[in-house]
Image (cartoon, rainbow, N blue to C red):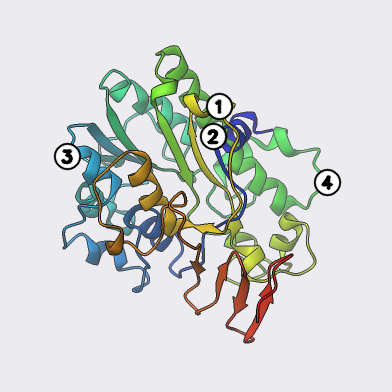
Amino acid sequence: RTPTLYRLATQGIQFRDYYQPAWGASTTTGEFSNVVGLVPTTAGMCMKEAVQQNLFLTMGHQLQAQNYYSAAYHNHNKDFYDRDKTHTKLGYDRFLALYGGLEGVKAVFPESDLEMINATVPQYIDQQPFSIYYMTVSGHCMYSQKENAMARKNYDVVAGMDHCEAVKCYYASQQELEYAMQSLVQQLEDAGIADDTVIVIATDHYPYGLERSSAWRNTSDYLAELYGVEKYDKFIRDHNSLILWSGCLEGKNIVVDEPVYSLDILPTLSNLFGLDYDSRLLVGRDVFSGESPLVLWPDYSWKTDKGQYDAQNGTFTPAEGKTVD
């Protein structure tokens, strides 16, 4: 169902043990950890507080300093999480969103990632080199045909799946990102610049809209069904994919087996782009540096290549094949 996303995930640098911890406050804290490379400690407020300071180390600022054409886009409301006040402070010359300069996107919920891509790529495809940031929204909960415009739009793709209605609608809503990336990659290839373009896709949080919760009106834990397990802990819940792809990487078979998480994105990209940065100012690590991996959670749980510690019950579990005293 998602050949483009599968291609990007398997033909770039493959991260086989990637995590986006649940930092609290859902999207904005996940976005903060991805972009700023620091631990979000004030749920819901971290981005607004951070932009009062010099965020020179973000990819946006680093490439802006090298005269890259830059823009940030979001296909939901411009002022959601005050992004109209924060995102130009992350190193982008302009921020366009729904009701904030972004044309060509229908005002339904959730809005279409494909429409956002098709409306914006012509604005920068000839402005090379460019540094572009997208915050997508098509996969947002709720997960029903009644409440999710993308689930309705793409439901025929999932209608025959052996899943409950909520999980099928989840898959249908995510399908819109596949169509968006299919369009983007095709436009890059048509322009002859796919080998000179880097695409990074990172999640903001696990699909909490499928949890058993009165807030989401779920009487069953559909998240367990999505994951194919009877029960899960934070290590299963927050395990995810990180895409780091360029056309020039295809066929290189670069694999990272060690634990990696969202705070490692910025130092890794800074290294790969040859940027001048002080690694002591970032919490994560460049995954190619040889430094020991560390993934941490806000409840003080953690995981390394030696094993994982669950602070909730005070237990350490060695990794397979590892002996730890």
Label 3 element class: loop
Q: CA distance from mark 1 to mark 4?
A: 33 Å
Vertical side of 245 occupied by 79: above or below: below
**Which residue position holds label 4?**
162
Q: Residues within 10 Å of mark 2 (few under 14, many from 20)?
A: many
Along the polypeptide, which appears first: circle 4 or circle 2?
2
- Name which residue type carries label 4: Asp
Vertical side of 275 occupied by 41: above or below: below
- Name which residue type carries label 1: Glu
**Which residue position holds label 2?**
12
Along the polypeptide, which appears first: circle 1 or circle 4?
4
Q: Residues within 10 Å of mark 3 (few under 14, many from 20)?
A: few
At a point 21% along the width and 47% down the height, the residue shown is 88
Is there a contact, CB below 8 Å, between mark 2 and mark 1?
yes
Q: In the displayed structure, does residue 153 sit left or right of residue 68?
A: right
Along the polypeptide, which appears first: circle 3 or circle 1?
3
Q: CA distance from mark 3 to mark 1?
A: 29 Å
Select label 4 or label 2 by which is in front.
2
Label 2 element class: loop
The x and y percentages for residue 45 are: 30, 68
Q: Furthest-bottom residue in view?
A: 314
Report the quarter where the C terminus lies: bottom right
Select label 3 or label 4 by which is in front.
3
Select label 1 or label 4 by which is in front.
1
Along the polypeptide, which appears first: circle 3 or circle 2?
2
- Name which residue type carries label 3: Ala
- Name which residue type carries label 2: Gly
Q: In the displayed structure, does residue 82 sit left or right of residue 240?
A: left
**Which residue position holds label 1?**
250
Label 1 element class: loop
Residue 130 sits in quarter: top left
Q: CA distance from mark 4 to mark 2?
A: 31 Å
